[in-house]
Amino acid sequence: MGFPSDVTRALDLISELKGHEPLVLDLRGISTATDFFVLASGNSDVHVRAIAEHVVEELKREGVRPGHIEGIQGGHWVLLDYIDFVVHVLHPEARIFYQLEDLWGDAPRVDISAES
């Protein structure tokens, strides 16, 4: 499945900081809010925050800026809203608790770690 270049770049940036269990949900045709959810986990709040900050900083250098950022201070669940795609970086406990993969169960998904 091909993704827009910004989604692919976000995945690369997550990988650079060793984000766990990267997954893309294709929400086109399911949601009018955004086209893709990019999900990944970090080992700790500090790791989650570092991954999110890395994505923001590097995409900003490439001229891609988020419309909204939420949760960066706490680091348990950081949401980076780039309008056409949303990056969710979560602490493993938050990812289990909120179960975004199940909430959007109808969305086609690509487990990026399984493709490597």
Image (cartoon, rainbow, N blue to C red):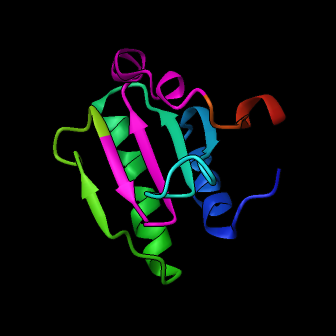
For the record, the magenta segment spans 78-105
Q: Residue furthest left?
A: 73
Q: Is residue 92 magenta?
A: yes
* Residue at point 43%, 65% (across, down): 82
* Residue at point 38%, 32% (across, down): 90
Residue 60 lies, with reference to residue 20, above or below; the image says below
Residue 61 lies, with reference to residue 93, above or below; the image says below
Residue 102 x %, y %: 52, 21
33 on left or right of 21: left
User: Depth check: 108 or 20 in front?
Assistant: 108
64 on left or right of 46: right
Is any part of residue 114 visible from this angle? yes
Residue 108 x %, y %: 70, 37
User: Depth check: 13 or 71 in front?
Assistant: 71
Q: Is residue 59 magenta?
A: no
* Residue at point 47%, 26% (across, down): 103
* Residue 19 quadrant: top right
Residue 73 x %, y %: 16, 46
User: Depth check: 33 or 36 in front?
Assistant: 33
18 on left or right of 82: right
Is any part of residue 116 visible from this angle? no
Q: Residue furthest bottom?
A: 63
